[in-house]
Image (cartoon, rainbow, N blue to C red):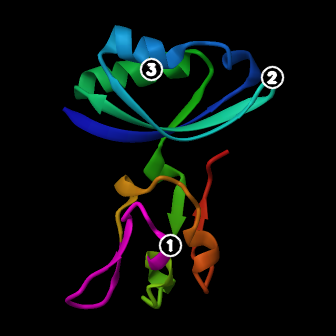
Amino acid sequence: MIKKRYILNFPPESGDKAFTYHLVKDYDIRINILKAEVFPGKRGSLLLELQGKKENIEKGVEYIVSHKIKCEPLDKRIYFQEEKCIDCGNCTAVCFAGALTMNKTNWKLNFDKNKCVVCELCIPACPLKLFKIDFN
């Protein structure tokens, strides 16, 4: 079993479909909705954590895409300019998910995109504005 996080962006015509139900029932995928922004009749965005067999998740993603829903791995939508980071640690103070931590040996910032929940609190916390998250 693996876990993967995806950001889904769906158009108004896909908003009334029970696609998460089908992921569970037809593809045996466990779903955890980590963030949702839904605007009825307009558009919506979801951050989903999918857990299951690799092949089932791949088939589930194909199902989502076949319904004109944009589906990208979370790590493709988070941008961090690590090379410019001064390791001040400001972002770690606001990261309740534990995605941003300081290495206690060398005091370098560690960013684990797999733990990110797209709360976007790191964006204003970073004095150098090194984070960008494309959720919508």
Query: Could you say which is closer to the camera, residue 81 or residue 47?
Result: 47
Of callouts 3 and 2, the N-terminal one: 2
Secondary structure that dominates the magenta span: loop
Of callouts 1 and 2, the N-terminal one: 2
Look at label 3 and name its amino acid.
Glu
Q: In which quarter of the image is residue 103?
A: bottom left
Q: In which quarter of the image is the N terminus?
A: top left
Please provide percent x and percent y for residue 112: 35, 63
Query: Could you say which is closer to the camera, residue 109 or residue 80?
Result: 109
Look at label 1 and name its amino acid.
Val
Query: Could you say which is closer to the camera, residue 89 or residue 9?
Result: 89
Q: Along the horizontal axis of the image, is 1 left or right of 89?
A: left
> Would residue 8 be counted in the magenta stretch?
no
Q: Is mark 3 on a helix, strand or loop?
A: helix
Residue at position x 44%, y 85% from top?
89
Report, in whole angstroms, how far the alpha carbon at label 1 lies from the one at label 3.
35 Å
Query: Where does label 2 land, which residue?
Result: 41
Q: Specify few, some or many for label 2: CA neighbours under 10 Å numbering under 14, 14-19, or 20 or more.
A: few
Q: Specify few, some or many for label 1: CA neighbours under 10 Å numbering under 14, 14-19, or 20 or more.
A: some
Look at label 2 and name its amino acid.
Gly
Q: Along the horizontal axis of the image, is 129 left or right of 31?
A: right
Q: Along the horizontal axis of the image, is 58 left or right of 134?
A: left
Query: Where does label 1 land, which residue?
Result: 94
Residue at position x 57%, y 76% from top?
130
Query: Where does label 3 land, which residue?
Result: 62
Vertical side of 79 occupied by 68: above or below = above
Is the residue under label 3 in contact with that under label 1 (CB below 8 Å)? no
Where does the magenta region start and end? 93-110
Q: Is mark 1 on a helix, strand or loop?
A: helix
